[in-house]
Image: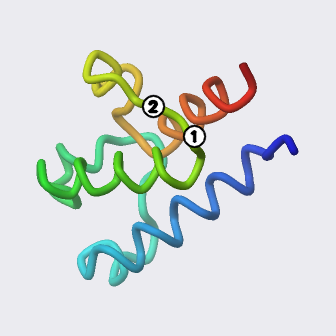
């Protein structure tokens, strides 16, 4: 079953809200900015997020894909997930 961009976005936001008190208390989380650069996630948060994504969507995210270009914002994460599950 193909997942939609909106469904993945909602699932990611729900996970981030549950896993990070800092994000949970943020009213307008930027979807096009780096959560790492903004201080919402640290390196452990990124690792947790990658683990969640890999388990949830049954995909593998390579270390080379953990770049600002491919994984640097929520919107970029959604695109990467979509690319991997719709291959």
Quarter in which the N terminus is drawn: top right
Rendered location of residue 55, percent (x, y):
48, 52
* Residue 49 placement, left or right of 39: right
Rendered location of residue 60, percent (x, y):
45, 31
Q: Residue 69 sits in which quadrant?
A: top left
* Residue 85 placement, left or right of 17: right
- Residue identifier under label 1: 78
Determine the residue positioned at 26% across, 23% down: 63
- Is there a contact, CB below 8 Å, between mark 2 and mark 1? no
Determine the residue positioned at 73% across, 57% down: 7
Indicate which disc residue 60 carries.
2
Determine the residue positioned at 84% across, 41% down: 2
10 Å neighbourhood of mark 1: few (<14), some, or many (≥20)? many
Precedes in sequence: disc 2 or disc 1: 2
10 Å neighbourhood of mark 2: few (<14), some, or many (≥20)? some
- As measured in the structure, the alpha-carbon distance from the residue carrying label 2 to the one carrying label 1 is 14 Å
């Amino acid at each position: 079953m193909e997942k939609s961009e909106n469904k993945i976005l909602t699932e990611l936001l729900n996970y981030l809200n549950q896993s990070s008190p800092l994000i949970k208390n943020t009213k307008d989380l930027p979807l096009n900015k780096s959560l790492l650069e903004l201080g919402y996630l640290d390196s452990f948060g990124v690792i947790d997020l990658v683990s969640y994504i890999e388990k949830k969507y049954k995909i593998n995210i390579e270390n080379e894909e953990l770049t600002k270009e491919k994984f640097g914002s929520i919107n970029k994460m959604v695109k990467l997930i979509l690319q991997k599950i719709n291959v």
